[in-house]
Image: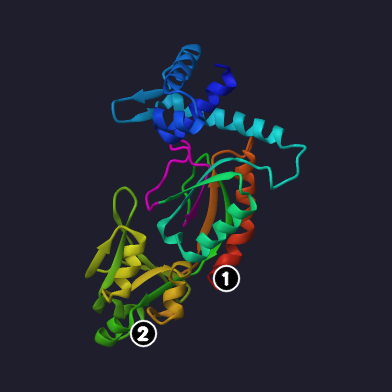
Amino acid sequence: MELLQSMQVFARLAELGSFTRVADGLQIGRPQVTRAIQELETSLGVRLFQRTTRTVRLTSEGEQFYERVQSILGEIAGARSMFTSPGSTLRGRLRVDIPTAFSQPKLIEGLHTFATRFPAIELALGVTDRTVDLVAEGVDCALRIGELPNSSLVARRIGMAIMVTCAAPRYLAEHGEPTNLDDLSAHRGVTFLSGHNQRPQPWRFIDGGREQSHISRQGITVNESNAYVECGVAGFGILQAPGIVLDRFLADGTLVEVLRPYRPHPRPVSVLYPSRSHLAPQVKVFVDWVREQFPKLCGCWLES
């Protein structure tokens, strides 16, 4: 098998993690997939995948090679599309990862407009609250909220998300509405557990120009974004989340904002991708699209 074809097979196997699925997707025999990977490993002199009866995973060498192969395949795709009309002929697989909190109707509808504009792009959407390793897991780009750790990833800020502290009317009717930060000690809260260590995520407030944090000592803890909001809706206690996430609940009165004078600083929303150069065309158009459209989708809950 030619080197370019072998690279394409390798990339698909890295993304799908299954010899059978790669064979079905590329419409070739499974033995051809196996042979392509074996020939590639032999020519490179390294093992690209760890194989068991259940899983196929990239080795550390495979991860490095996958990052380079993505760039090469992206360059080839870009060269092929140089002299064709933009938009309609863009094709290829695009894997996008978003936080569970962002899986809101407005964003999903927005993604549908993107898919309609670029029908030949195969869009794969990952929705999760865990931190995804873009390179190791073959993710092309991701949306993230909050401050980002230093890394080799390219991050483009697309806005600042306004944070809202709120509670269900039924909770406030039973426990009263807090009017200052000292009142929080007498209230129950919905606490979000974030990250691999499942650490409680504190609420943040601005009081007299200074930032303060608070972790509720009574209430319920949750490790999934949708369940976190639903616990607030059910009346478990006070919660704090981006207005983007809470918009429809605030609009219909299911949740009511409290402590508005103490709103915290907005949190950054960014689009991340692995490489500044050799960006695959389908990734580039998505990054450009999301930077332009995301502020429109989120309206009053996103500052520039």
Per the image, label 2 sits on a secondary structure element best described as loop
132 inside magenta stretch: yes
Residue farthest to the left? 218
Where does the N terminus fall, quadrant-wise? top right
Residue located beneath label 1 in the image = 299
Residue 275 seen in the current view: yes
Looking at the image, residue 259 lies above or below residue 102:
below
> Of residues 193 and 141, which is closer to you in this image?
141
Type of residue at label 1? Gly
Where does the C terminus fall, quadrant-wise? bottom right
Chief SS of the magenta region: loop
- Residue at image location 30% in from the left, 25% down from the top: 52
- Residue at image location 38% in from the left, 30% down from the top: 57
Residues at badges 1 and 2 in contact (C-beta under 8 Å)?
Answer: no
Residue 304 seen in the current view: no
Residue 11 location in percent, x, y?
Answer: 50, 30
Per the image, label 1 sits on a secondary structure element best described as helix
Type of residue at label 2? Thr
Residue 175 location in percent, x, y?
Answer: 25, 84
> Of residues 175 and 207, which is closer to you in this image?
175
Of callouts 1 and 2, the N-terminal one = 2
Residue located beneath label 2 in the image = 179
The magenta stretch is 128-146
Q: CA distance from mark 1 to mark 2?
A: 28 Å
